[in-house]
Image (cartoon, rainbow, N blue to C red):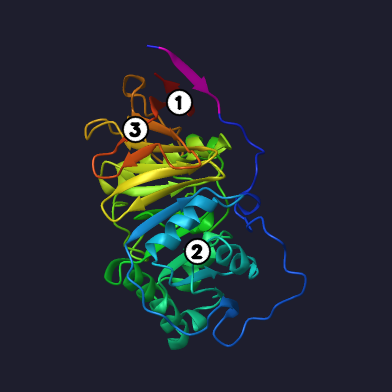
Amino acid sequence: MRHLLIFATTGLLSLAACQSDPPVVSPTTTTIEADATGSLGLVGDAADVSRTTAGGTVLMGGSTDVDAAFQWMITKAGGGDFLILRATGTDAYNAYVYGLGNVNSCETLLINSRTLANDPQVEAKIRGAEAVFIAGGDQAKYVNFWKDTKVEDALNYVRNTKRCPIGGTSAGNAIMGRYYYSALNETITSAAALDNPYDPNITIGVNDFLDNPYLANTITDDHFNNPDRRGRLVTFLARMSKDKGIVPRGVGLDEVTAVCIDANGASQVFGSGTAFFLQQNGGSNTPERCVARASLDWYRGRQAVKVYKVVGTATGTNTFNFNNWTGTGGSSQYYYVDRAALGVSY
């Protein structure tokens, strides 16, 4: 069996640097003030419409947006009203999304306080949308501002009762799974996480914030083309296994890459990067050592975590099925941790 050791390094990009991802479109040239409902403006028809929708979830890895993923959402939304949610940033998504396909309107809401997150008008706008997309930024703000509010209730209504597509990029992607890295303290590097899986900066939340089908026991991460993300995601899985007694799963996404999951759990991978689908290799292959102030050991014969890698394409020809955790057009490998060093075997 071939194997490769990857030694974690420090001094890489911070979370804030990695997760500020405005779409690459013409920038707003003037400062736009949000109105009383947090709206940064609307492009298209302001009159509400009702369209037939199909549920779905988009996980996007950050940086340049993937046009095909938004077009996938527009189709699932039946050409209805497309809503962007964010806690910082501009209205740049409005023109971008509106120009991609047949949507009645695209509006951006800047929800940067719990007061706004509990505003009935804000709740009504979310409930009236046929598609909702959460922009990049800082997922700690989404947790602090939106958790246990009317925004939370509205998001779950849109996804699970109204059955509309919902998605997110970068920080927006990071809160899509049942488990999420909240980043409530400081960011965590792979080196620090592998050296101490109970480092205080490893803040993993259990998501009653968003009940997303097919992402149970799953944590998502982004900017995965940065190798420093991989060791920390494996550490998150180790913590989920040890603390929750589950067989944990993870989805790591390169930048300019999107996974679009339909209402039946089948997905397509769009874009120019790779999607990584991680799963503990069976119920008995728990970490050998996952304790505070000691390095992580998760060896299991160099097969601790199964990994399936799927390269994105412009048309989404390569796939992954979230029902049985298998894919097409990809390749398999294993991750393991030997005394705080992340390794790969084939």
Residue type pointed to by label 1: Arg
Percent position (x, y) of residue 326?
Answer: 29, 35
Quarter of the image containing the C terminus?
top left
- Is 4 within the magenta? yes
Residue drawn 56% across the image and 45% down it: 256
> Closer to us: mark 3 or mark 2?
3
The residue beneath circle 1 is 339
Q: Is 188 inside the magenta-drawn segment? A: no
Name the one closer to the observer, 121 or 316: 316
In the structure shown, which secondary structural element does the residue marked by tag 3 occupy?
strand
Q: Is residue 336 left or right of residue 94?
A: left
| Residue 329 x, y percent position in the rendering | 38, 30
Q: State yes or no: discs 1 and 2 in contact (Cβ < 8 Å).
A: no
Q: Nearer the viewer, mark 1 or mark 2?
A: 2
Q: Is residue 231 above or below residue 198?
A: above
Q: How crowded is mark 1: few (under 14 residues within 10 Å), some or many (20 or more)?
A: some
Q: Residues within 10 Å of mark 2 (few under 14, many from 20)?
A: many
Give the residue displayed 37% in from the left and 53% down from the top: 179
* Disc number lying in front (3 or 1): 3
Q: Which of marks 1 and 2 is nearer the N terminus?
A: 2
Q: Report the span colored magenta.
A: 2-7
> Which residue is rendered at x = 44% and y = 83% of the image?
48
Residue farthest to the right, as pictured: 29
Mark 3 / mark 1, whichever is N-terminal: 3
**Looking at the figure, which quarter contains the N terminus?**
top left
Determine which residue is flagged by label 2. 134
Residue extending furthest top?
1
Q: Earlier in the sequence, mark 3 or mark 2?
A: 2
Residue plotted at (48% across, 57% down):
71
Image marks 3 and 2: residues in contact by CB distance under 8 Å: no
